[in-house]
Amino acid sequence: MEMQLIRRFFLRLSIMGELRVHQSLLTFACHLVLSVSVYGRLEEVIKDTSEASRVFNVLKDILEHILLDLHNIQKNIHFWQSRAEGSNTRKAYFLIFERGPRAFIDGTVRLIRECVVEGYGMKNLSHSASAHISERITVLSSLRYHLATFLAQVYTEVDRFGEELVKNPEESLPTLLVTINGLFSKLEASIDRFHAMHQIDSSVDGSYSFPLMFDKLPEVNQEGSQWTDCEIRDAINLIYENLHKLDSYLSVLVAKHQKPRKVTLYWMRYTCGIVGISVCSIWLLRHSKLMGSSDIDNWIREAKNTTVSFWIDHVEQPLLSIRDELFETFRKRHKGVMEQEEVQLTANSLHRMLLAFSEQTTGEKLPENALDQELLEIVMARIPQYTSSQVQRESAGLESD
C-alpha cells in the first residue's frame, strides 16, 4: 500500500511539469521507499548473495543521484520563475545589470542603438529578457519532468519485482537489471526528442551539441534467463556507467541554463566597492610618508587638536561650571540653615521678654512653655490701660499748671 502511494506521488510529479519539488518531501519519500519496498523485500536475498546486495546499492544510488539532480534543477527553476514574475523594467534590469560586465556592455549598446533607430529600445529589451528567462524555465522544467518520470518508473518496476526477488532471486535479478537498463534507454529517447524540438530555437550556445547516449546490455544477456555472477556484475557496472553519464550530461546542460552566480548577480556592487577602495587607497598613498608627504601626519595632528579643543570647550568646561554651581548651591543652602538658627534664637529671646512682661503685669508666675498668643493677649490688654493712665497724668499736669 505504501509503495502504491509513493509511486502515485512520483507519477503525478512527472505529469505536472510546473510542480515545485521540495527536497525534504522527496528525501522522506525515498527513504520510505527503500525501507518499505526495496529493503524489506530484498532483506532475505541480501543475506544469501552479494550480487543482490549490489543491486540494492544500485537502486539507492539511482535514487540519491536523481533526487540530487531534481533538487538542483528545482533551485534554478525557482530563480527563473521569480524573475519571470517581475515587471518588464525588472526583466530589462536583469538582462543588463545582473549577467556580468560583457552582458552589461552588449545590453547598453543594444538599448542605445534600438532607442536611436527604432525608438522601442526598452520594449524590445524586455521582450528579449522574457524570452531568455522563458527558454531556461522550459528546458529545466522538461528535464525535471523526464527525471521524475524515470524515477517513478524505477519505483514501479521495483514494486513489481519485489515478490519475485524474494521467491526466485536468480531469475528476477537479471530481469530487473535488464528492465532498469531499458528505463535508461527510454530516458535517453525522451531527452533526444526534446532536443530535436528545441535545438533550432535555442539561444544558448552548445546546449544540444552533445547527445545523451547510454550504454546498452548485449542482446545475449537480455535473452538469457540464467546469468552468471560475472554477467550480473557487468550489468551492475553498466548501470553505474550510465548513471555517471547522466550526471555528466545534466551537470553540463543545467550549467548552461542555471541561474547566475552571486558574484555575477551583484557584480556592479562589487565593482563599485572595489573601485572605491582602490581610489581611497591611492589617495591615502599619495598623501602618506611613503610618497614623501606629511599631509596625513598634519591632518592627524589637526584632528587631535580639534578633538582636544572640542573636549575642553564643549565637555570639560560645561561640566566644571555645573560642578561649581552645584557646590555654590550647597554652600548657600548651608548658610540658609545657619540663618534659620539665628531666627530661632531671636524668637526664643522675644518669648522670654513677653513672658517677663506678662508676669510683671499680672503679678503671677507663668509657665515657661506658655503660648506666644496668650502672652500677646496679656500685652494687648495692658496697652489700653497704660495709654489711659498716661493721658490722665498729662491732663492732671496741665490743670496744675
Image: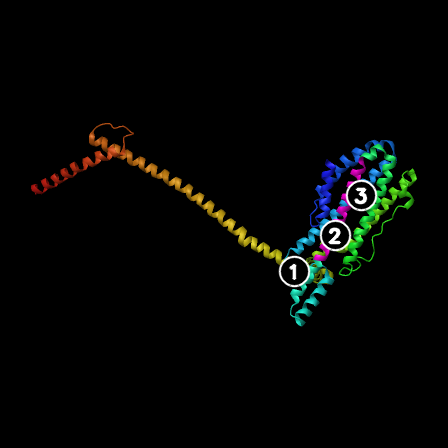
Q: Residue at x 85, y 43 (%)?
A: 178
| Place of residue 189 in the rendered image (x, y in percent of width and height, measured from the top left) | 81, 51
Q: Nearer the viewer, residue 341 or 170?
A: 170
- SS of the residue under disc 2: helix
Which residue is rendered at x = 16% and y = 36% of the image? 385
Residue stretch in magenta: 134-162
State which mark lies toward you, 1 or 2. 2
Residue that numbered label 3 is attached to = 62
The residue depicted at 39 percent of the width and 40 percent of the height is: 338
Q: Which residue is mark 1?
A: 298
- Residue wearing tag 2: 142
The answer to if 267 sits in the magenta stretch is no
Disc 1 marks a residue whose amino acid type is Asn
Q: Earlier in the sequence, mark 1 or mark 2?
A: 2
Query: Dot 3: few (<14), some (14–19), or many (≥20) neighbours within 10 Å?
Result: some
Q: Residues within 10 Å of mark 2 (few under 14, many from 20)?
A: some
Which of the two residues, 89 or 223, is positioned nearer the viewer here? 223
Q: CA distance from mark 1 to mark 3?
A: 70 Å
Q: Earlier in the sequence, mark 2 or mark 3?
A: 3
In the image: residue 292, left or right of residue 228: left
